[in-house]
Amino acid sequence: MSKIFCRKFSPVLLAGLAVATLPMFAQDIPMEGPLPTTALVMVQSKNQVPLDPASLKLKVDGRETPITAVAPIPPAVEQIAILIDDGLRFSFSNQLSEFADFINALPQGAQVMVGYMRNGIVLGNQGFSTDHAAVAKQLRMPIAMAGVDGSPYFTLSNFVKNWPSNQRGARFVLLITNGIDPYNGSYSIMNQDSPYVQTAQEDAQRAGVAVYSIYYGQSWPRRARGSFSGQSYLEQVAEATGADSFYIGTITPPSLMPYLKDFRQSIDQSYMLSFKVSAPRMKDDTLMQIRLSTNQPGVKIHAPNGVHPGVYLQ
């Protein structure tokens, strides 16, 4: 769990980067030879020591795999989607200026968009733009009606499978939600396995998206009982995609700016990791397990659980 003025030592981000729309799921795609594949790597160093690429070791489906390149991510290839739960209580309006400041402070050339999650889809999405001031003006108060939030995981799946950009780039999502899955049977305070959460994280992996989240609690009595479950689900998706979830207990802090700074830092510490995988015949819903490690002292690296073969940024 990330604390308000600090981040857990595992916000280390690795997420595969999709470069093209995938064909219809479950169709066999014949491939010959190694497939160039790219993943995003976010590195956290205790002493701000630069990453030593020679210290990295990669395994794909348990097999040692050579790394062909490690390169920083320039702002021009950043694609940042900020998705806000439209069912959040009105108090979220107090944070709108912080989100505007965050967007306006993005480096020149970075692409950003704002959308509102309602009933399984994203509303108000005007696409990515490098005009940060114009995107900041799209921020508004949530409608704050019980029931309109639905499941953020239905929304996430739909969004990443229809990513609103055909350009190659490093894909980041920041969810602001309570994380509760109302379709999983109950609002229990205990986390339960949810097929919808699992599907959402796998769809994000296939699309090459790192899914960050900021927990924002609800005042609706039934939803309040599911706070711990919601936080656990958000953390599950974040870890599966190599990202991080930010929260402090079930309390929503008066300021979200520390979390936004941590999110920005994660992007700044990201690298493009390139390698080749052998997949002579695959389906376009194929996910290969990856594991990245380093023997560099004071450095932590986390990878997503899976990456789609052939996801390539270069």
Image: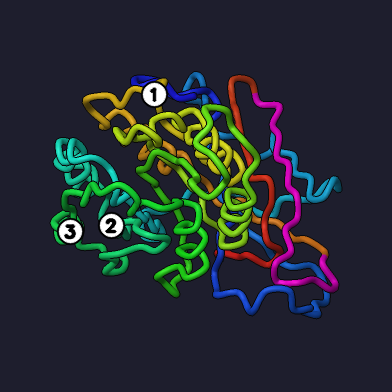
Which of the numbered marks, if any, corresponds to residue 175?
A: none
Where residue 116 appears, as percent x and y from the top left, is 30, 56
Point 30% across, 47% down: residue? 146
Question: Which stretch is magenta?
Answer: 279-296
Q: In the figure, residue 263 lies in which quadrant?
A: top left
| Label 3 sits on residue | 138
- Crowd band around label 1 with a 10 angstrom C-alpha radius: few (<14), some (14–19), many (20+): some
Circle count: 3
Spatial CA span between label 2 and label 3: 7 Å
Spatial CA span between label 3 and label 1: 28 Å
| Label 1 sits on residue | 250
Where residue 131 appears, as percent x and y from the top left, is 20, 62
Q: Return the disc, 2 or 3, that comes first in the chain's sequence.
A: 2
Taking the image as drawn, is residue 17 in sight? yes
Could you say which is closer to the camera, residue 270 or residue 250?
250
Circles 2, 1 touching at the beta carbon (< 8 Å): no
Could you say which is closer to the camera, residue 124 or residue 212?
124
Spatial CA span between label 2 and label 1: 25 Å
Q: Is residue 106 left or right of residue 299?
A: left
Is residue 261 located in the magenta-colored stretch of the structure? Answer: no
Could you say which is closer to the camera, residue 303 or residue 144?
144
Q: Return the disc, 2 or 1, that comes first in the chain's sequence.
A: 2
Q: Mark 1 belongs to which amino acid? A: Thr
| Label 2 sits on residue | 114
- Whether residue 78 is situated above or below residue 253 in the rendered picture: below
Circles 2, 3 touching at the beta carbon (< 8 Å): yes
